[in-house]
Amino acid sequence: MTRRTDLTLGILAAIPVGACASAAGIMTVAGDERMLAIQTSLPGSVLIAGALVSAIPLSVLIARQVRRRDHARAEAREIEVARDAEARERANHQRFLARLDHELKNPITAIRATAVAAQDGGQDDSWRTVDAQAAKLSTLVRDLRKLAELETRELELERADLEQVLTEAIAALAQQNPAAGARIALAVTRVPWSVPPLSLDLDLVSLAVDNVLGNAAKYSVHGPIEVRLREHDGWAVIEVADAGRGIPAGDLPAVFDELARAQNARDVSGSGIGLTLVDTVMRRHCGDVSVRSVEGSGTVVTLRLPLGR
């Protein structure tokens, strides 16, 4: 259809100039030497008029060709962007598999070695090691399954008060870890306005807040933990700040990757799924999460949820 249209435009462009060229030729052969007031011969004027008329469909044809070329370039760019995104996704998946292999290999090796030692007459401590490593594997598998479910499950939205969510999360942590609970302070900004109730999946947002608070308690054995809630530029902003060990600068770019753990956190139990889960929950609510940290000084995790979803 496009080729037929272009052919039609080409014919339309050729007809006027061809017809006028023929007329100019006939006038010349007939000896017509009449002149226009602008001192241009009549045959030449007719030829120019034909060229001007032909320029109209010709310009349309050129414009179509330019648009077609630009469209082809845009499609090529889109294909290139899609390929780059696919390559990044493959690279991320490969890193995830490498981390998964690393996280699973150590517990499995420990379980097998302990089982062999137990068969050779080891002590009861051997079976406690088996139980601990098996529990670690169970937790890892559970967290991975939970993360996969978060990506696809339908949100169950309800109006919720973020201050109440934070208060309940702090109380739950204090019940599990009284020492950490005693170090937590909640600050809510209400002037000139407070954060209004939001439409949230309460279970998921509570899960995200619990993970951030739990990390603050785990990685800051001493020192205060501040939880802050405020409104800023149409966002509900939650900050959880601690004075703990912090995250090395080299590990910060990967903190939201599955199974990613900082080099200085290997001595603390965990699966490396927590911040990935938090990031997923925030994205499902059209929000985001960011981390600022200095090794040896502390960490600030910022959750943002839009007020006008």
Image (cartoon, rainbow, N blue to C red):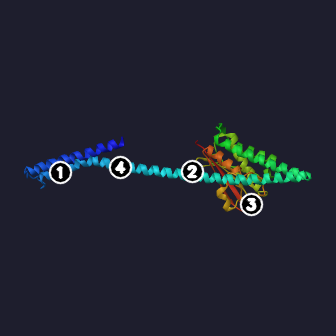
- Give the number of the mark in front: 2 or 3: 2
Where does label 3 land, which residue?
264
- Give the number of the mark in front: 3 or 4: 4
Measure how far apart labels 1 and 3 are at the Cα level.
84 Å
Label 4 or label 1, whichever comes before in sequence order: 1
Secondary element at tag 1: helix
Measure how far apart labels 3 and 4 are at the Cα level.
60 Å
Secondary element at tag 4: helix
Where does label 1 land, which residue?
47
Q: Are marks 3 and 4 in contact (CB under 8 Å)?
A: no
Residue 64 or residue 6, whichever sits in front: 6
Q: Which corner quadrant holds the N terminus?
A: top left
Instruction: Determine crowd level at label 4: few under 14, some 14-19, many 20+ residues with C-alpha closer than 10 A.
Output: few
Where does label 4 land, which residue?
65
Residue 136 x, y percent position in the rendering: 79, 49
Q: Are marks 2 and 3 in contact (CB under 8 Å)?
A: no
Q: Which mark is residue 86?
A: 2
Q: Amino acid at mark 1?
A: Leu
